[in-house]
Amino acid sequence: MKKITKCMLGALMTGAMLTPVHAEEATTSIQYSKTSEYTLSIDSSVTVSSTTETEQAIKVSNVNTKSNEKVQIAIKSGVGSNGKVTLTRDDASGVTTEVTASLDKNGAGIGANEVIAEFEDQSTTATKGGKLYYSKIPADAAAGSYTGTIVYVGSVVARN
Amino acid sequence: MKHKKLLLAGMAMMLGWLPLRVQAADDQEGTITLKATVPASYELSIPITSTNIDYDQQTQQIGKLSVQGNIEAGKTITVSVKEKKDFKASTNPQEVPGIPFKVTKAGSEFSNEVWTSDEIKAAVPKEITLSIEFEADAWSMASSGEYIGSVVFSAAMN
């Protein structure tokens, strides 16, 4: 009886030792996607001078774009042909005057939907534009206080 | 932390710029308000500063008064005679009595004249002609000599 038991255990052990072992590999893919983002830092109000040209910075902070994207800020409305921006006298008299908006000091007027600044990667230094210049109020403008409005739009677009 | 962010956003708004944190695909609009003030300015043209008066003339034109410039709509410029000094002998003004006179406009004593913003900016300026007028016997009672008088005008924007 003992011999039979030993023989069976031996057969089992042998069988176990002869069972084939398969090596397996598995891959875990880790993905991370961060969308481009930025924070606009643009003065909401600018006082235009009647004696000198006025400069306004078009800035962003916390900018972080994908390598194939950029932040683009463009004029949406408020700028007419040759960069003219109309300012209306506050007394409801209908009297208006104009200043010229340009990307360069004493430069030519911008277009009605001109791109005024572009930023890439994590740099807050504009790769294009980044400043707006407003010409002084014309000498023949009627005395008084004037207000005008420019609407701009910031967006993330594909790089060229 | 949340309160700190709100506080920072509030401070940014107070400082005049608009922090807009934007995720991709979210176009974000903003507005720039341009403000300008054109200061008022004007020039007062007064009658000639030196003119010889004929000794026997009771009335003598001294010239035109006008205001030109650029003032806000609704504002006015008022010009008035601030001071006039009677004609007195230049050699011994203390001893010889002065010759009184008045400034007149169209025969009436001139006190002040008002120019509106439109009149001031008009291509053809509004002018008024002023004269000085002496009493009828003023010259006959005056001692011989050279006399000097003056008129000081003042202008104020209202």
Image (cartoon, helix red, strand yellow):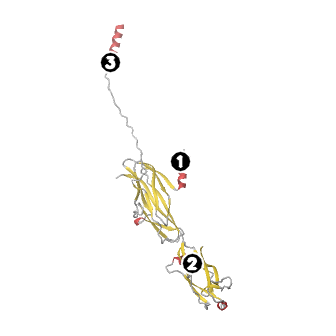
Q: Are marks 1 and 3 on the same chain?
A: no
Q: Residue B150 occupies which quadrant of the picture? A: bottom right
Kind of residue at badge 2: Trp
The residue tagged 2 is B115
Q: Is residue A124 above or below residue A135?
A: above
Determine if residue A152 is in view.
yes
Q: In whole angstroms, how far apart are the C-alphas of marks 2 and 3?
A: 119 Å
Q: Horizontal placement of B122 versus A1: left or right?
A: right
Q: What secondary structure is marked by label 1?
A: helix
**Residue found 55% across the figure and 49% down from its top:** B7
Q: In whole angstroms, how far apart are the C-alphas of marks 2 and 1?
A: 56 Å
Kind of residue at badge 1: Lys
For marks 1 and 3, give the one nearer the viewer.
Answer: 1
The residue tagged 1 is B5
Kind of residue at badge 3: Met
The residue tagged 3 is A17
Check the residue under mark 3 and report the chain it is in: A
Check the residue under mark 1 and report the chain it is in: B
Residue B39, x across and y down, in percent: 53, 69
